[in-house]
Image: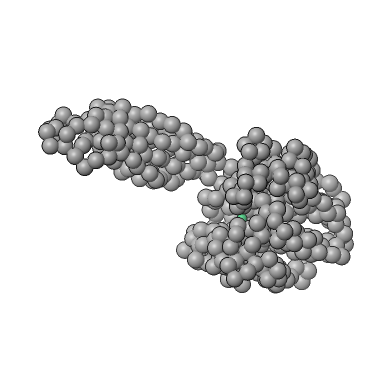
Amino acid sequence: MASLLDPRRTIRELEELRALTGDEHGAQRVAFTPTWLEARAWLRRRFDGLPVEMHDDAAGNFWATLEGESDRALVIGGHIDSVPNGGWLDGCLGTLAGVEVLRRVAAQHGGRPPVTVRVVDWADEEGARFGKSLFGSSACSGSLDRDEARRLVDKQGIALPAALRAVGIDFDRVTDSHRELATAAAYQELHIEQGPVLLDLDLPLGAVLGTFGVERHAITFRGQAAHSGSTPMNRRRDAFLAAARMGQEIYPIAAQAGGVCTIGSCTTKPGIVTSVVEECRITLDQRHLDPAALAGMLAAARAAADRFAAEGRVGVAWERLWQIEPLPFHPALIALCDEAIRETCGVSHRLPSGPLHDAAEMARAGVPTVMMFVQSLHGISHNKIEDTRREHLEQAVAAFDRLADKVVAWIGRGNRP
Ligand SMILES: [Zn+2]
């Protein structure tokens, strides 16, 4: 099997794509632009000589299908679109690793594997032009808010529906993409980590547990403005004091739950040097992979805010700014991913993903899903300096292919261990 797979070919293709669609500032494959269309045309040619059916779906996602004995399908995803001045691996590593896996599967099974294997290249994962990430995969999963998407405009004032029309996509039909998932039995995606966790552990690869849920709130404490000279300390109703105590309290709350909490902003009124603070507004961002733990962190923060408000004789009001539920990946597939990584490089590590990915949309749609992360040098992405060691890229393609082999067998057993 190893001889059928050629991870170095994937690296050569990534370099070819970089030369074709990048410049001295980095990758320039912004979705729905001429450069992106060129990248897509180049991608289609990667399947030359393979017995695959290819088409773009209603949302502009590209699908290549190697039909198997069963129509139950392993879907392997990635995104060839980039941010402006992007890195050479973000997104396209996943798509091209998928191509290489499909080549190996086709060769090993004489063009007809036991289950169907599909590569999908999602449209506009980055949302660089319209500010809306995961366009193609959310249209496919069914979670796309069409009324919100219809109103999006780019810097030139072009609306998303018009930009889509220019590349042959009918905005009113984009959610028809959902029918592609009718036979999806599992989804796997390889991506560069975009953070420092694997780098700090000195590990090439990790199995991703899911994407964090987020609770984002504004908390406003209201006390009383009073002269800083004439008001004794025991008579003050200091809104800043209550907020400041929250700043300390989120550390034990995060530590106890094993999540992260951030107070990212703090504004005071009247905001002058000679007055006790009447009103203090802070923002709180809480993230966790486990819904109960996330809810627990929020409840703990609310209880603390109430306590500090009561003790300081100030009022407190909460306003939810944004929220998304955690999207955990499939336990059996995480175990297979771990196994594939250990067989390839001896040691694996499980980690959550802070950023969202197309895989989160597949998990949300109910498709058993897993992701594999490869170490990111500098822990940096969305930048032309984004990079990964060559040997880590080769290990990534090899481990990802092992995972595909295991998932094909898992699907063949009716998604049973
Ligand atoms: Zn990406």
211 relative position to 105: left or right: left
Q: Position of residue 169 (x, y in %)?
A: 76, 46
- Judged from this view, the residue extending furthest toward the front is 156
The mark tally for this picture is 0
Compare residues 22 and 380 and report the one nearer the observer: 22
The residue at 63%/64% (across/down) is: 27
253 relative position to 17: left or right: left
Compare residues 339 and 55 and report the one nearer the observer: 55
234 relative position to 27: left or right: left
In this orientation, does residue 125 appear? yes
Compare residues 46 and 173 and report the one nearer the observer: 173
Question: Which quadrant contains ligand 1?
Answer: bottom right
Q: In which quarter of the image is residue 400?
A: bottom right
The residue at 46%/33% (across/down) is: 320
Q: Quadrant of residue 300?
A: top left
The residue at 24%/40% (across/down) is: 272
321 relative position to 400: left or right: left
In this orientation, does residue 190 appear? no
The residue at 27%/36% (across/down) is: 270
Q: Where is residue 232 in the image (x, y as percent from the top left)?
A: 12, 33
- Residue 17, relative to residue 112: is it above or below? below
Q: Position of residue 404 (x, y in %)?
A: 72, 56
Q: Where is residue 31 in the image (x, y as percent from the top left)?
A: 68, 54
Look at the image and tell me in which quarter the N terminus lies: bottom right
- Residue 253, relative to residue 40: is it above or below? above
Compare residues 102 and 94 and report the one nearer the observer: 94
